[in-house]
Amino acid sequence: MSSSLMPRPDSFNARARGTSHIDFKTATTGVAAKAMRNEISRLVATVDDPATKKAFDTEMQSFFYLFTRYLAERAKSQDLDWDRIKSPAEDQIVPYADLPKPKDHSNLNKLAVLKVNGGLGTSMGMTGAKSALEVKDDMTFLDLTVRQIEHLNTTNRVDVPLILMTSFNTHEDTLRIIKKYANQQLRITTFNQSRYPRIFKETLLPCPKRADDDKKSWYPPGHGDLYNALLHSGVLDQLLAEGKEYLFVSNSDNLGAVVDENILQHMIDSQAEFLMEVTDKTKADIKANYEGSIRLLEIAQVPSEHVEDFKSVRKFKIFNTNNLWINLKALKHVMETEGMELEIIINPKTTDDGQAVVQLETAAGAAIKHFKNAHGINVPRQRFLPVKSCSDLLLIKSDIYSLAHGQLVINEQRMFETTPRFKKIPKILELDHLTVTGDVYFGRNVTLRGTVIVVANEGQRIDIPDGCILENSKFRHPAIF
């Protein structure tokens, strides 16, 4: 009797070929999906208000779809074919210098501007919305954006609205801040991007137990959520109803991302449904590149053995600035027919109590594959001025830049194309290169010119006194000024 329960010899051969491994992954995928669906149902059931419940359920269904895609991709275990990934062909990138000049400003009435405004300023010592940080002449990121668009509207007698996509981390701050713009000559619309539950890495179950659980159990799923959030919030339909046809999207902390009528005219003339602004890469740029047939490749998707290759300027000569131009009618069509299937970025995190969790995110630029005649525009570096650190903030606050109607303008007396990176704010108008190593303190009204290198040895400190002028100088401890 017992012998009849033994597997046939050929079943062992099947196991050797790996089918049992595939079956196991398929089976566990199904179990994980069912368990997640049950947990999501419990989360939705914790919401009492019918309207809130319906909106939350829609949000959770979008999350569940992303989660099941993640499970399916994990089961396939397909590695990125690095040899197939190349920079885009020349005909896929249009040089900015080749763009046409607009005949008039009327096309601006077809445009809306969207700023991705969901980030916190934690990397710069802030606790609230990063866009509330003062960056130049006592003006915040939001102040500068409002000033730019108001000037655009009043000067050209057009109506370009400003759309702010916030997250649950920044929404309340943003609503409070924009009250001061009530009398400005522009319309501001805000909407919240999705809020997805973090997933425990071990169990693949959601961290929150209730819809109103602590913020630490949730996360905003990257700027690729833009398309779902635009649709479900009703903002996409609102813009179309107002006669808007094009949307210019950028990060709120990119101070170079201003409306460009040449790019808008090119989009109309070329009938492109999607444009991505790219710029020439330097060794400091490691964010994102193209993949093969117009796809976006983020560094989080790159296998560890190819990260240095990804960063290299040899393999990828351009990178995505995340300045995007989108045809709104085409977006509506894509969302209602095929939908957006953006590459999933797996972002591992650790909770305050040491538990490993996973965030499933997407990038807005990855949508390029869904649109007809989509291509890149190689723009000047001045359209990519992100402020991600205190060293970036130094440059913006320094005398290298001034403001004109909310837009940064580089000082005409600046002789060098590149800009240094530093955490203090000396006068650097005539600075070419700066290296600072070790424990170095700068006094007030310090002027740096030419090439300046200051190196403090381990355990030592160099103090640069008030009013000091350093020109083509190299100092090591002990330094005498």
Image: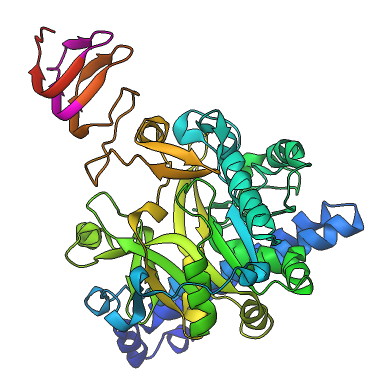
Please tell me whether residue 229 is drawn above or below residue 118 in the rendered image.
below
Total numbered badges shown on the rendered structure: 0
Q: Quadrant of the C terminus?
A: top left
Q: Is residue 461 left or right of residue 123?
A: left
The spot of residue 387 in percent (x, y) is: 43, 41
Residue 205: horizontal and vertical position, in percent? 60, 56
Residue 314 horizontal/vertical position (percent): 16, 65
Q: Is residue 136 magenta?
A: no
Horizontal arrangement in the rendering, residue 395 relative to residue 360 (left or right):
left
In screen coordinates, is 192 left or right of 451?
A: right
Q: Residue at x 58, y 68 (%)?
A: 66
From this viewpoint, is residue 71 visible? Answer: no
The image position of residue 109, as x and y in percent, is 68, 68
- The one nearer the camera, 319 or 182, is 182
Observer-nearest of 120 and 418:
418
Q: Is residue 212 above or below residue 70?
A: above
- When the figure is inspected, residue 408 is found, relative to residue 437, above or below; the finding is below
Residue 426 can be seen, yes or no: yes
**Image: magenta residue range:** 449-468
Q: Report the front residue among 366 and 348.
A: 366
Q: Is residue 45 left or right of residue 260?
A: right
Whether 462 is among the magenta residues is: yes
> What colour scheme was applied to this rendering of the protein?
rainbow
Residue at x 64% of width, y 75% of height:
328
Judging depth in this view, the residue of 244 and 201 nearest the camera is 244
* Quadrant of the image occupied by residue 90: bottom left
Who's the residue at 51% across and 55% down the image?
258
Q: Quadrant of residue 104?
A: bottom right
